[in-house]
Image (cartoon, rainbow, N blue to C red):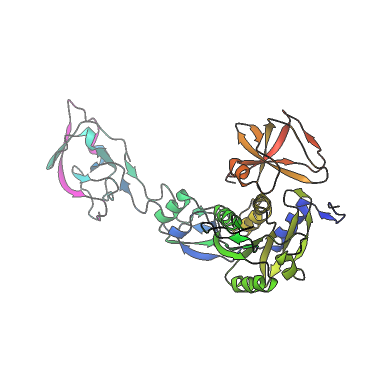
């Protein structure tokens, strides 16, 4: 039960509710330049071999290998140079036995040539070349399909496309790729006391940190984020803002207005459309989630630390599922805790910590308004619901906030 006798929802149950309600976004075909970090929506199969033709791996001379057998510095082989081939040129004329063609790295090997003698093994002659060392058959010739053959799988569906994947696709002639697009996340802060950063403050006013914090978190999770200016504590104004944004969003995230106060605008406006309740966690107990016109809406607490942790625990897995990623939830790793602290039984506690080389040091107090402590932390110590006390030296589970997974 909650602090006031209300039933609470376990963290894992609330997360399951969210994940079950979200499906991957429909695929979109994008230029490679826009696909970095996105997930391939389908297998990509090579339509061409890579390389597409036999080409030289060195600057040198294309030869018949048998013409150079026995060549030494004391007894070199002399071959007439009958032409030159640069990268990007065509090589359609067959190389006659007993001759050589100057060739550049990447240039097509002429028909009939069976090796390339590098410059370093010759006198670099222009009309006649002196070969001082014999190549072996096929030396310095990169055969068509050596890297990738036609029909090979280049990228499988579900792959997060990094620079090397995109380079492979480009090299194989693919200019575009089918991906799950970036989710469009709209961030709305609520509270008549909020003012834009940079604006002067009046009595009782504070700067809106949450929308910047959450929009940055959305971008870090691979989404496109759009920050809406703070909305006053008026249900009508809030609903008007929500309806204005719903058509352009894949996800809407609000912060503030979900507790039990007299001015909890989000809960008042959406109480008949979303689930609202207490989740058995600290910080971040008051939560809300549901869909409006098919768009997932997350209503997070207003305290910055609670909002940020809720975003990491609940919104990020949803964004990852929208992107078609296979791993949705932050992995946990073990660490040794540097000092002890108490934890409320019945709630999963998330303690801000500085993690380094297997040691987790709790940072600051437990207050959910402490932005300075949040900025100093790079991890969360995750304390199970049944644990009342953590002692210095205990092994704990930690969630690394900036870890790629």
Which x, y percent locates residue 85?
22, 50
Which x, y percent locates residue 69?
25, 33
Q: Residue at x 68, y 60 (%)?
A: 256
Residue closest to the far right? 5
Whether the magenta-drawn stretch holds residue 294 is answered as no
Q: Residue at x 20, y 31 (%)?
A: 132
Which x, y percent locates residue 30?
47, 63
Which quarter of the figure has residue 72? top left
Of 106 and 379, nearer the camera is: 379
Residue closest to the far top? 74
Whether the magenta-drawn stretch holds residue 68 is answered as yes
Which x, y percent locates residue 218?
58, 56
Q: Residue at x 56, y 56 (%)?
A: 212
Q: Which residues are magenta?
A: 67-91
Which quarter of the figure has residue 334? top right
On the question of residue 51 being in view, the answer is: yes
Q: Is residue 144 left or right of residue 154?
A: left
Which quarter of the figure has residue 39? bottom right
Of 312 and 149, nearer the camera is: 312
State whether residue 334 is above or below residue 109: above
State whether residue 301 is above or below residue 63: below
């Amino acid at each position: 039960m909650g602090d006031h006798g209300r039933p609470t929802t376990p963290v894992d149950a609330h997360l399951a509710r969210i994940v079950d309600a979200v499906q991957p976004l429909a695929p979109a075909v994008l230029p490679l330049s826009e696909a970095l970090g996105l997930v391939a929506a389908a297998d990509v199969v090579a339509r061409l071999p890579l390389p597409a033709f036999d080409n030289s791996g060195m600057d040198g001379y294309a030869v018949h290998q048998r013409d150079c057998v026995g060549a030494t510095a004391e007894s070199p082989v002399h071959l007439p140079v009958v032409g030159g081939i640069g990268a990007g040129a065509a090589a359609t004329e067959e190389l006659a036995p007993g001759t050589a063609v100057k060739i550049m790295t990447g240039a097509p090997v002429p028909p009939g040539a069976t090796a390339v003698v590098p410059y370093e093994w010759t006198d670099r002659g222009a009309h006649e070349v002196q070969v001082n060392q014999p190549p072996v058959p096929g030396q310095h010739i990169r055969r068509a399909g050596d890297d990738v053959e036609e029909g090979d799988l280049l990228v499988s569906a579900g792959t997060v496309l990094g620079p090397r994947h995109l380079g492979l696709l480009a090299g194989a002639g693919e200019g575009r790729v089918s991906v799950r697009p970036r989710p469009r996340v709209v961030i709305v802060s609520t509270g008549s006391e909020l003012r834009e950063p940079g604006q002067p403050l009046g009595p009782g006013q504070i700067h809106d940190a949450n929308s910047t914090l959450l929009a940055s978190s959305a971008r870090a999770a691979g989404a496109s984020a759009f920050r809406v200016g703070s909305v006053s504590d008026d249900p009508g104004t809030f609903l008007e803002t929500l309806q204005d944004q719903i058509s352009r969003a894949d996800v809407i995230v609000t912060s503030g207005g979900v507790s039990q106060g007299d001015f909890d605008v989000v809960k008042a406006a959406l109480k008949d459309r979303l689930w609202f309740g207490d989740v058995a966690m600290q910080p971040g107990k008051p939560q809300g989630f549901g869909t409006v016109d098919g768009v997932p809406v997350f209503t997070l607490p207003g305290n910055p630390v609670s909002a940020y942790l809720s975003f990491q625990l609940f919104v990020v897995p949803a964004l990852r599922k929208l992107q078609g990623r296979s791993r949705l939830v932050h992995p946990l790793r073990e660490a040794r805790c540097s000092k002890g602290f108490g934890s409320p039984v019945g709630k999963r506690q998330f303690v801000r910590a500085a993690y380094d080389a297997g040691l987790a040091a709790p940072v600051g107090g437990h207050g959910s308004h402490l932005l300075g402590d949040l900025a100093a932390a790079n991890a969360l110590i995750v304390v199970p619901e049944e644990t009342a006390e953590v002692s210095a030296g205990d092994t704990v589970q930690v969630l690394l906030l900036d870890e790629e997974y």
